[in-house]
Every structure is written in C-alpha cells, then in structure tokens.
Image (tube, grey):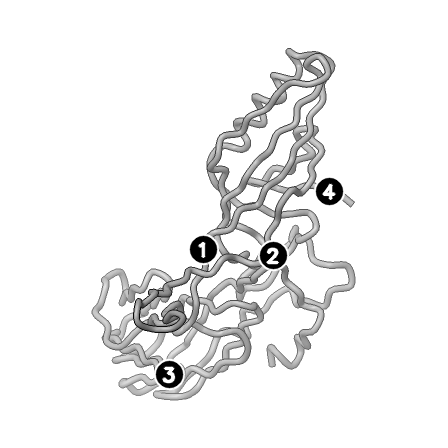
C-alpha cells in the first residue's frame, strides 16, 4: 500500500519522497463568538446564532514531513526544484489512507530545508491549509471509472436517478445526505414552471420561473431563470445529514422535473459500510 498523498493530481511518489504525517487534525476548530460580559458569570456563546442555526468551522492545517535523497547536491537541488513547483498554488489533496475524501488545500507557509549528509539528503516540512471539511470524490451522480472505491464495496456506479424527481404542481421530494455535514445543493427545475417554492422545515425559498428552466444555487445564493438572475423571497437553506423531505410547490399546472446536485462533506473520513444502498436510493 502506498504511503503518501496526491496533490494537484500528482502523487508524492513521483518525486521520490518518503512521507510521514506530522500533524493531521481529525476535527476543525469551531469559530467561536463568546462575548465576555463584566457583570455575568461565564460568557454568552453565540457561535450557533446564525441563519444556519449551527456552529461554523475554521480551516485546518495538515503538516507533512517529506524526506528526499539524491546522489549529490546538484541532483538534490534538481529534485527540490520540481517539488517547489508542485507544491505551489492550490488544488485537491487526497491522502492514501483516506482515498474517498478530497480536501481543497494549498501550501501557504514557506518551505525551508537544510541539506544533510553532504548534500545527499533533505528534510522538508510542508503545511497544507485546507477547508474545514473534506468532500466525497463523487456527487449525486455517483462514482466514475478511476475512483478508488474500497474492495468489495457495493456503492452503485450511478445514483443520479435517485436525485431526480417528477412533481405535479406540488409534492415532497426525499433527499438523502450520506455525509456528516450539512450541504448547500444546486437544485435545477425544468418543465411547466410558474412561481416555485421550496421548503425544508421552517425555512422557505420562493422565486419566479415564468415557464423557463431555473437553477437555484444554494452555495452562491443565486437563482437563474434561463440565463437571467431573478429575485427571491425567504432564505437559502442547507440539507442536513440524513433523510430530508423538501416540499416543492409550483404555481403552474403540469409536471416539473427537479434535480438535486451536491457533494457530501465529512468531518474527517467517509464510511459507506453502514449504508444499505438499495433502501437508501429506492
């Protein structure tokens, strides 16, 4: 089994380095908002006082130690030059021992080293600044050829049909979020569209479509009817982990097709072993 990581679609083994993990936090730090009032014991915690009703998280830092050897100092410098180009910028980061989770990361600190053993060895410490949550390799469309699925996994190769719904005027759609963390989906609606209302629990989002195909991007908080932005009332919401029922209402008569797209997110690793895919995607 390889011991290393892939960054910007290139594996550490391509550069002849030995990788050791120095620090890999399994949770992200909470963004705390706790004003300390002088005439009150303790403090107020407003960390979850936001439209999502949950705590939000800061970026996390992964620290890797890279060991590199060469026949002489000139060869060592050549290998280090290639490493410098590879580790510049941002991209996807995948650890060999967590192959189903992708981290959006970049190297933000300088990388320094001291040649050892007469210029034939170098130890480098690389710090990746990553988004607080990892994402699944695949979204609601399911995995594709080349994804490193676990041996014996019964994850279906296509799940997109389970996230496409036909609604006549009004109805509920059942959305399963297999991840640990709430997600902000992209919801696409085609067909006989009028004014559309989407509701989850106490939260509702309404917008006009006027007979056009409409796309509601809950991450960017925009709605487009055709190519034009339209105004909305209510609020964009997240889809929590687990089974969720969204009520869809259309003011026009006739069927509409509702497609929900997102990638599941994880606090650390992705575990699909407990999922009965037959029941979940029925």
Residue 3: mark = 4
Q: Nearer the viewer, mark 4 or mark 3?
A: 4
**Which residue position holds label 2?**
26
Image coordinates of residue 15 in percent, x first then y, are 66, 29
Give the mark nearer the N terminus: 4 vs 1.
Answer: 4
Q: Earlier in the sequence, mark 1 or mark 2?
A: 2
Alpha carbon separation for disc pair 4 and 3: 47 Å
Write the residue at 47% across / 52% down.
59
Quadrant holding the C terminus: bottom right
- Distance in Å between CA atoms under marks 1 and 2: 13 Å
Q: Secondary structure at mark 3?
A: strand
Residue 101 falls left or right of residue 220: right
Taking 141 as reference, is 209 left or right?
left
SS under mark 1: loop
Nearer to the camera, 188 or 254: 188
- Residue 267 appears at what percent x and percent y? 56, 61
In the rendered view, tell whether residue 33 sits above or below residue 175.
Answer: above
Structural distance between the alpha carbons of marks 3 and 2: 37 Å
Position of residue 186 measured from the top left corner of the image (x, y, whole percent): 40, 66
Q: Quadrant of residue 31?
A: bottom left
Residue at 23%, 63% in the rendered image: 229
Task: Evaluate whether residue 52 shows in this view.
Answer: no
Q: Nearer the viewer, residue 212 or 214?
A: 214
Q: Which residue is mark 3?
A: 248
If you read the primary sequence from the N terminus, does the residue marked by circle 3 or circle 1 appear first? 1
């Amino acid at each position: 089994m390889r011991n290393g990581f892939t960054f910007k679609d290139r594996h550490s083994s391509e550069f002849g380095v030995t990788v050791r993990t120095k620090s890999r936090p399994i949770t992200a730090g909470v963004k705390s908002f706790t004003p300390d009032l002088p005439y009150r014991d303790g403090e107020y915690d407003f960390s979850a006082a936001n439209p999502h009703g949950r705590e939000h998280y800061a970026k996390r830092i992964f620290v890797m130690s890279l060991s590199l050897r060469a026949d002489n100092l000139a060869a060592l410098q050549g290998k280090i030059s290639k490493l410098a180009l590879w580790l510049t910028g941002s991209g996807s980061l995948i650890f060999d021992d967590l192959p189903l989770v992708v981290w959006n990361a970049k190297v933000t600190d300088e990388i320094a080293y001291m040649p050892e053993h007469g210029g034939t060895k170098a130890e480098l410490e690389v710090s990746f600044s990553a988004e607080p949550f990892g994402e699944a390799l695949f979204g609601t469309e399911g995995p594709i050829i080349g994804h490193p699925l676990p041996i014996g996994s019964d994850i279906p190769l296509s799940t997109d049909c389970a996230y496409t719904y036909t609604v006549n005027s009004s109805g509920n759609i059942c959305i399963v979020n297999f991840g640990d963390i709430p997600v902000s989906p992209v919801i696409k609606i085609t067909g006989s569209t009028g004014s559309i209302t989407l509701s989850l629990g106490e939260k509702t989002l309404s917008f006009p479509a006027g007979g056009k195909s409409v796309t509601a991007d809950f991450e960017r908080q925009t709605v487009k009817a055709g190519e034009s932005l339209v105004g909305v009332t209510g609020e964009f919401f997240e889809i929590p982990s687990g089974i969720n029922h969204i009520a869809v209402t259309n003011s026009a008569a006739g069927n509409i097709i509702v497609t929900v797209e997102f990638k599941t997110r994880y606090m650390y690793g992705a575990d699909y072993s407990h999922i009965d895919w037959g029941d979940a995607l029925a």
